[in-house]
């Protein structure tokens, strides 16, 4: 009993003695095995294979993220963010009019009236007012699927095309937001 009390007292004194009054920065360390990276960054190694279809061809248009009601832009890239593996991050054409995302889009995507090339040459991103005036369509998606992690594919395009032809077996279909339309009925 005395030993337990002595140990508790010693631990309390040690904790109090180690307490610092100045704020300290916390540093997180993430260890990623080298074989997972294959020349990509950890974010790319863990990226999902997002396959989608749109109302028309937006493949050269810069994507932004809208709020849940698709009224305002909540996230947009810096011009330097438009690259994936050293190339402009345009989506990859797949079978039957589907696209493989290289930017990290979600169901809340909208596309701007800027090509990847034009936007990547800007010295900085335009202000929100300008970006919102450049939205081409607020609800451009007709279908979206998440087909596992990109690094799980050996021949990504061929394997995703096979999944498309097989009806996206094993993929998760994403629920897309529905445009809210207000109609007034006069009596």
Image: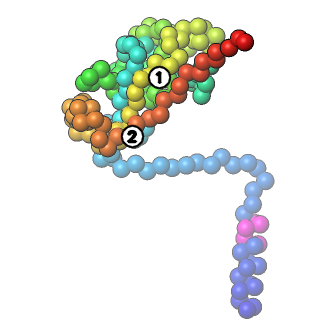
Residue at 72% from the left image edge and 12% from the top image edge:
187
Residue 160 visible: no
**Chain-order first, disc 2 or disc 1:** 1
Q: Give the crowd class for mark 2: few <14, some 14-19, many >=20 residues within 10 Å.
A: few
Q: Is residue 15 part of the magenta span, yes or no?
A: yes
Secondary element at image label 2: strand
Q: Is residue 124 above or below residue 100?
A: above
Q: Nearer the viewer, residue 150 or 5?
A: 150
Magenta span of residues = 13-17
Q: Position of residue 42 (x, y in %)?
A: 41, 40
Is residue 185 toward the left or the right of residue 121 in the image? right
Considering depth in this image, is 9 or 32 the residue closer to the camera?
Answer: 32
Image quarter for residue 173?
Answer: top left
Q: How is the image coloured?
A: rainbow
Decide whether the magenta segment is chiefly helix, strand or loop. helix
Q: To which quarter of the image does residue 117 belong?
A: top left
Quadrant holding the N terminus: bottom right
Which residue in the protein does label 2 denote? 172
**Which numbered circle lies on residue 98?**
none
Q: How many marks?
A: 2
Q: CA distance from mark 2 to mark 1?
A: 27 Å
Q: Secondary structure at mark 1?
A: helix
Q: Position of residue 131 (x, y in %)?
A: 57, 12
Q: Residue furthest front?
A: 187
At a point 64% along the width and 10% down the height, the residue shown is 129
Q: Quadrant of residue 47?
A: top left
Compare residues 186 and 143 and report the one nearer the observer.
186
Coordinates of residue 170 in the picture (x, y in percent): 32, 44
> Badge 1 is on which residue?
81
Label 1 Cα crowd, 10 Å radius (few <14 / some 14-19 / many 20+)? few
């Amino acid at each position: 009993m005395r030993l337990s009390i002595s140990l508790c007292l010693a631990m309390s004194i040690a904790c109090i003695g180690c307490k610092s009054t100045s704020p300290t920065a916390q540093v997180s360390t993430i260890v990623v095995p080298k074989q997972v990276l294959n020349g990509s960054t950890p974010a790319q190694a863990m990226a999902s294979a997002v396959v989608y279809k749109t109302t028309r061809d937006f493949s050269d248009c810069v994507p932004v993220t809208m709020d849940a009601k698709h009224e305002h832009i909540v996230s947009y890239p810096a011009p330097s963010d438009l690259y994936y593996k050293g190339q402009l991050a345009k989506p990859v054409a797949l079978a039957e009019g589907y696209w493989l995302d290289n930017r990290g889009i979600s169901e809340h995507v909208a596309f701007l009236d800027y090509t990847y090339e034009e936007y990547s040459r800007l010295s900085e991103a335009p202000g929100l007012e300008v970006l919102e005036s450049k939205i081409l369509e607020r609800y451009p998606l007709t279908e979206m699927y998440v087909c596992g992690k990109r690094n799980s594919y050996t021949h990504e395009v061929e394997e995703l095309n096979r999944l498309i032809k097989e009806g996206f077996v094993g993929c998760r279909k994403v629920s897309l937001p529905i445009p809210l339309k207000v109609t007034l009925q006069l009596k």
